[in-house]
């Protein structure tokens, strides 16, 4: 199995190319939990592969596939990983341009069991999503 | 600031643990920003050393100095850092026990310029501070 960081890069490419299933297949455990912060309509916890795929598809629909995830840095540890990305997207005349710090906990089989998304400007993310 | 990136981040955590305000201030850029996630009374952005130290003073005061940060993994390079912490605290008879992911961005001198925090159980944190 390739390294955690390399698979994360592949998974981000899948997101950018609109492939939510590819993202999940590359990276996530079946019983993954994704914590989405803030006070927008999507804030909360997503449990299991299918719920996460639904969340990612929702972003693609909202942004009409303008969502771009550009990796800035990946810090890879034993059980945890933190990735820093620049996320840009547009919808209905609104544009988003934030730095996201995504924290991940990996299980013994090298798949992400828990995923936290952190933005440096959560208000901008919340108002963009609505 | 001198030392390897991981050591700098460990110095920040040690300064917190030692209640050493001077060392904490020394780890922070003057215009550092601390994004506290969630929807509780302390959530929001703290800008500048004084505001950030004031935040930690409030946390110590509110929790009768019971908050402990036990590092699970600490990762860093010249640009970014990550700390995964088991955080425990007590306040007004309530107990907190969560894993928190902190993301850090460093300035060219190795001081903390920006950091974010998010928990695996944000609802527990929001309730703890309610």
Image: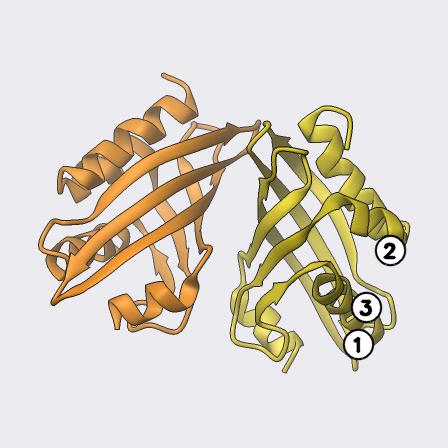
Chain colours: A orange, B yellow
Q: Which mark is residue B101?
A: none
Q: Which residue is mark 3?
A: B57
The kind of secondary structure element at disc 1 is: helix
Q: Is residue A11 left or right of residue A109?
A: left
* B58 relative position to A109: left or right: right
Q: Is residue B27 visible?
A: yes
Residue A122 lies, with reference to residue A81, above or below; the image says below
Badge 3: chain ID: B
Instruction: From the top left corner, tell me how far across and down residue B53 is, in percent.
Output: 77, 62
For residue B62, the mark is: 1
On the same chain, marks 1 and 3? The answer is yes
Identify the image quadrant of residue B88: bottom right
Quarter of the image with the N terminus of chain A is top left
Residue beneath disc 2 = B21
Under circle 3, the secondary element is: helix
Choose the circle earlier in sequence order: 1 or 3: 3
**CB atoms at circles 2 and 1 under 8 Å apart?**
no
* Residue at point 54%, 57% (across, down): B118
Location of residue A33 in the rendering, given as x and y in whole percent from the top left corner: 40, 52
Going by the image, does B3 lie left or right of A116? right
Q: Secondary structure at mark 2?
A: helix
Quadrant of the rendering where the C terminus of chain A is positioned: bottom left
Farthest-out residue, top: A1
Percent x, y of residue A50: 23, 51
Chain for disc number 1:
B
Which residue is rendered at x = 63% and y = 53% of the image? B32
Mark-to-mark CA distance, 1 and 3:
9 Å
């Amino acid at each position: 199995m390739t390294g955690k960081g390399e698979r994360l890069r592949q998974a981000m490419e899948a997101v950018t190319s609109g492939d939510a299933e590819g993202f999940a297949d590359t990276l996530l455990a079946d019983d993954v939990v994704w914590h989405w912060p803030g006070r927008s309509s999507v804030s909360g916890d997503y449990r299991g592969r299918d719920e996460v795929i639904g969340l990612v598809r929702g972003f693609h629909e909202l942004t009409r596939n303008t969502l771009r995830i550009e990796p800035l840095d990946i810090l890879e540890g034993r059980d945890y990983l933190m990735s820093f990305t620049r996320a840009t997207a547009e919808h209905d005349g609104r544009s988003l341009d934030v730095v996201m710090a995504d924290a991940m906990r990996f299980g013994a089989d090298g798949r992400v069991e828990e995923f936290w998304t952190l933005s440096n400007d959560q208000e901008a993310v919340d108002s963009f999503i609505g | 600031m001198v030392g390897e990136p991981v050591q700098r981040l460990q110095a920040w955590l040690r300064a917190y643990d030692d209640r050493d305000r001077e060392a904490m201030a020394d780890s922070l850029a003057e215009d550092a920003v601390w994004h506290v996630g969630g929807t509780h009374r302390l959530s929001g952005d703290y800008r500048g050393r004084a505001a950030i130290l004031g935040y930690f003073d409030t946390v110590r005061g509110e929790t009768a100095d019971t908050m402990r940060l036990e590092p699970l993994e600490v990762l860093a390079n010249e640009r970014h850092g990550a700390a995964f912490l088991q955080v425990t605290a007590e306040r007004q008879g309530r107990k907190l026990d969560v894993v928190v992911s902190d993301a850090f961005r460093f300035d060219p001198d190795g001081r903390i310029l920006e950091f974010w925090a998010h928990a695996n159980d944000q609802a527990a944190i929001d309730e703890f501070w309610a």
